[in-house]
Amino acid sequence: MTNLSQFDSQPRSATDTHAITALCKAAGDPLRMQILKVLQQNAYGVLELCQVFDIRQPAMSHHLKILANSGLVATRREGTTIFYRRSETHPDPDLQPLHLCLFNSINEAALDPGLRNRLESINHERSAASVAFFNQNAERFEQNQDLIASWADYGDSVESFLDSSLTNTQSVLEIGPGYGQFLGKLSSRFDQVTALDNSAEMLERCRSSAKALGLDNINFKLGDTSLALNQQISSDCISLNMVLHHVATPSEIISDCAQLLSSGGVLLITDLCAHDQEWVKKACGDLWLGFEPQELTRWASSVELTEGNSLYLAQRNGFRIQLRQFLKS
């Protein structure tokens, strides 16, 4: 039996009805539905989406405009490129339950294998470009980072953040350790440290730095989080220190970290807040111009990580750094 109390006693207005119709019409197209699936956890530019779906730009732009006008996708300009991602909440509060129900259903749907393969190809191109940059600029890594924020500017805050987060200290995984500035602290606080990097040149420099400091409890591994998952490198703590803005799929990295964390473990993220300084892409190899804090919260929440403490640091050059803590129950 239908429970009439679930419904408003007053009929919805004509304007509300039109809004519902517009949202359903925007989603009620096979191609647009697949676009929303592709945008489930990552942002892509129009040319990348044209490559995924093998259609011309005018047609893709038409579909994206319909989705944007209906409140189903949001845009973000990074320099000359506009990236599209799903809008996690609809701007009309009355449509938010329908919006959420639609996305939950899309999340459960399967992605066409052909689309998945082309999507993986684009993500691989992004990753390869990042790895190539670091392999070619390993000797200038610290100099490049200093253009944004040097370890001396925020390292003490990161180390204090670590101290306030620790419960279990058996194992820690640092993804993208750079020159190893954080490894000394990690080595002194954990029994076993794993340093994971997908750049051979950067990993070798990190290894040399650790050797010079006499750090003997560090295991260096060349690869990414896929390698860590395959080798089941479970950790009590994972550090992502200025890494996410260099990776092709930030949300997937957070998802991998959630799987790698032991029960009661903590994920520590240090990264840039969203900014508009486009020059860092060429100078520092950045793929993303930072992140809104709520983006990190949403990605972590989607893999059942609970938000903990946060700290925000303003830099003299206009950048802001966010230190974030996420916990696994």
Image: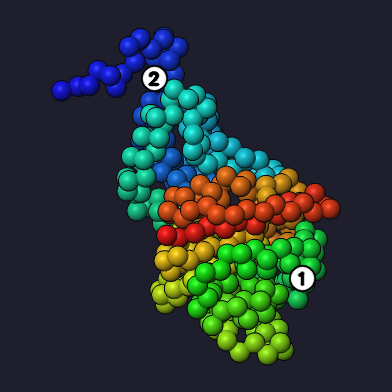
Q: Is residue 18 above or below residue 144?
A: above
Rendering quarter of residue 221: bottom right
Return the residue at label 1.
142
Return the residue at label 2.
21
In depth, the one of 226 and 292 nearer the eye is 292
The quadrant of the picture occupied by the N terminus is top left
- Position of 129 with respect to 275 (left or right) is left
The quadrant of the picture occupied by the C terminus is bottom left
Rendering quarter of residue 12: top left
Report how far apart the C-alphas of labels 2 and 1 lie in the structure: 54 Å
In depth, the one of 295 and 131 nearer the eye is 295
Residue shown at 62% from the left, 68% from the top: 163
Farthest residue, direction right = 316
Q: Give neighbour class at mark 1: few <14, some 14-19, many 20+ (Cα, 10 Å).
A: some
The spot of residue 24 in percent (x, y) is: 38, 25
In depth, the one of 140 and 121 nearer the eye is 140
Residue shown at 56% from the left, 46% from the top: 295
How many labels sit on residues? 2
